[in-house]
Image (tube, rainbow, N blue to C red):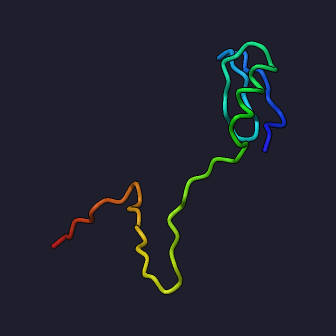
Amino acid sequence: MTHSKIVWNFNVKQWFCTTCGRTSDHVAEPDARNELDQFDCLLPYVDAPEVLPGEETVRLIKKPFKMRRKKETE
C-alpha cells in the first residue's frame, strides 16, 4: 500500500505520512516518496489486553480526595 498523502513538517524539516506516521528526512518530495514507498502504509496499533468471557476481573476503587477519618467521641 502506498503512502497517499505526505506533507512537509516545517518544525522538524521532514516529510510526514498522515496515515501511518512514517517520516523521511529527504528534502525533495519525490526522494521522500521513494523512501517511504519501501514500507507498507499501515496504521500502527497496540495490542490491548483482552478479557475473555467468564474470566474474573478486578476493579480498583479510588479513595475520595477529601476523605478523613472520623474521631469517635466518648
Q: Is residue 72 left or right of residue 56?
A: left
Residue extending furthest right? 4
**Looking at the figure, which quarter contains the N terminus?**
top right
Q: How many marks?
A: 0
Q: Position of residue 27 (x, y in %)?
A: 73, 13
Residue extending furthest bottom? 54
Residue extending furthest left? 74
Q: Residue at x 51, y 74 (%)?
A: 51
Q: Is residue 24 above or below residue 71?
A: above
Q: Residue at x 40, y 55 (%)?
A: 65
Q: Position of residue 10 (x, y in %)?
A: 72, 15
Q: Position of residue 35 (x, y in %)?
A: 71, 27
Q: Is residue 6 above or below residue 13?
A: below
Q: Position of residue 40 (x, y in %)?
A: 71, 43
Q: Residue at x 22, y 65 (%)?
A: 71
**Looking at the figure, which quarter contains the C terminus?**
bottom left
Q: Nearer the viewer, residue 56 or 6?
A: 6
Q: Residue at x 79, y 25 (%)?
A: 7
Q: Nearer the viewer, residue 10 or 36?
A: 36
Q: Nearer the viewer, residue 67 or 11?
A: 11
Q: Is residue 64 above or below residue 15?
A: below
Q: Nearer the viewer, residue 42 or 69?
A: 42
Q: Quadrant of residue 58?
A: bottom left
Q: Is residue 54 left or right of residue 73?
A: right
Q: Is residue 28 above or below residue 71?
A: above
Q: Is residue 32 left or right of residue 48?
A: right
